[in-house]
Amino acid sequence: MKREPYFYMAALTMDACMGAVFLAVPLLSDQLGATVVQLGYLGSLGGICYAITCPFAGRLSDRYGRKRVILVSAFLCAGVYSWVSQVHHLAMMFVLVPLGLASAALFWPSIQAWIAEAKDRPTLIRTIGNFNVAWSLGLLIGPLVGGRLYAWNARFPLVFAVFGMLGLGMMTLLCAPAEAAAALPRGLHPSDDPKESSQKAHAGRRFLYIAWIANFSAWFINGILRNIFPKLALHLHLSSTIYGGLLSLVACFQIVGFLLIRRSDRWHYRIRPLLRYQTLALLGCGLVYAVTSPYLFGVAFALFGLSMAMTYYASLFYSVYAQEKKGRNTGLHEGILGSGGVLGAFFGGLIAGRFGLKAPYVLCFGLMVCAMVAEWIIACGFRKRPVGQPGGEG
């Protein structure tokens, strides 16, 4: 298998499996007697393990190689979710779900760092765009398949995930390309002009922080959609198939967003395009709070998908572009989005338990507004630096 197609197939497979898991775990936990607050705790505990493991996994891949860490991740995930498929007591979910997400956390920083090695800027933009489309296709397929399988048996989506993880491990073992030595690609060499080089480095750091804030807020919402929205769906008598379709809409419109974003680099080092996409998430929060129609929920989930496309793309791009130790940076990128999911599930569960199942979306709206203000302040601070100092041409 050629180098890039392996990465795309691996990302698609992993997220198809995890999409089925994300659908099945809250619904299965509800069958085992979980309250909405317990669902929030379960999601946040899993997210904590994911967020903590990601930076560690990135450094492991820098040290021991991407392929080894990916193999460990795939086979560990298969083992854990095989066990989850046999669970009959809620307490075991609080052990196995965090372990499964920690195992998955070994995969993403490793493959993101691997795919970004030795690429110039145009190639990197194209490759990241294709990679993002691939994993989004996985998240589109996984919930759709999982929703249908769940309608037959609550444990079938987990069986689907186990076989998919085993397939990923075998594909990595037999078909993954040889690891190339990391090299600074053409177009990323330091500038001959020290002032210009300093300005570019400063711009990169500023927009990396901005993108991380944006991605955190997006995945805060996503943590609520994955862990708390299922309770609202059940309350409104929406079927598992409809809920799976809604989750797939997020992935579907992420793909649309990625395809639009990858066609241009005009959004690089500019704050307004990012803020425009985040405004879509604000509209989505308002819709989920105000309506009960599954069709209007679909509009809201589509808006969330478009918004998350930009925040994720920006966070990953700034994490790997012209950076050394890509595994460390992609680990932080994944850890930050994981921590957003943690806090979204935790606070969403608390708010829903106290103020009602729609209340978490007011919290999301407020958090997104605060994040956008913080991003604007950071960007304005960059632009206002006097010319002649690092960052003066932002």
Image (cartoon, rainbow, N blue to C red):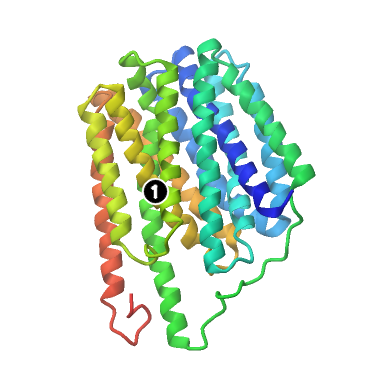
Residue drawn 44% across the image and 16% down it: 30
* Neighbourhood count class around disc 1 (C-alpha, 10 Å): few under 14, some 14–19, many 20 upward: many
Residue drawn 30% across the image and 49% down it: 278
Image location (x, y in percent) of residue 5: 66, 48
Quadrant position of residue 232:
top left
Q: Which residue is mark 1?
A: 216
Residue drawn 43% across the image and 57% down it: 314
Q: Nearer the viewer, residue 140 or 117?
A: 140
Q: Above or below — where is 309 with respect to 324?
A: above
Q: Is residue 98 visible?
A: no
Please give left or right for residue 355 compared with residue 306 in the image: left
Image location (x, y in percent) of residue 221: 35, 39
Quadrant position of residue 98:
top right
Image location (x, y in percent) of residue 321: 52, 65
Q: Nearer the viewer, residue 150 or 76?
A: 150
Q: Nearer the viewer, residue 318 or 72?
A: 318
Q: Name the element at disc 1.
A: helix
Q: Above or below — where is 29 with respect to 56?
A: above
Residue most extreme to the right? 174
Q: Above or below — where is 269 with respect to 54?
A: below
Image location (x, y in percent) of residue 306: 36, 44
Please give left or right for residue 115 compared with residue 317 in the image: right
Q: Above or below — where is 388 with respect to 257?
A: below
Q: Is residue 143 visible?
A: yes
On-image quarter of the C terminus? bottom left
Quadrant position of residue 378:
bottom left
Please give left or right for residue 279 compared with residue 263 in the image: left
Q: What amino acid is found at the position of numbered circle 1 in the picture?
A: Phe
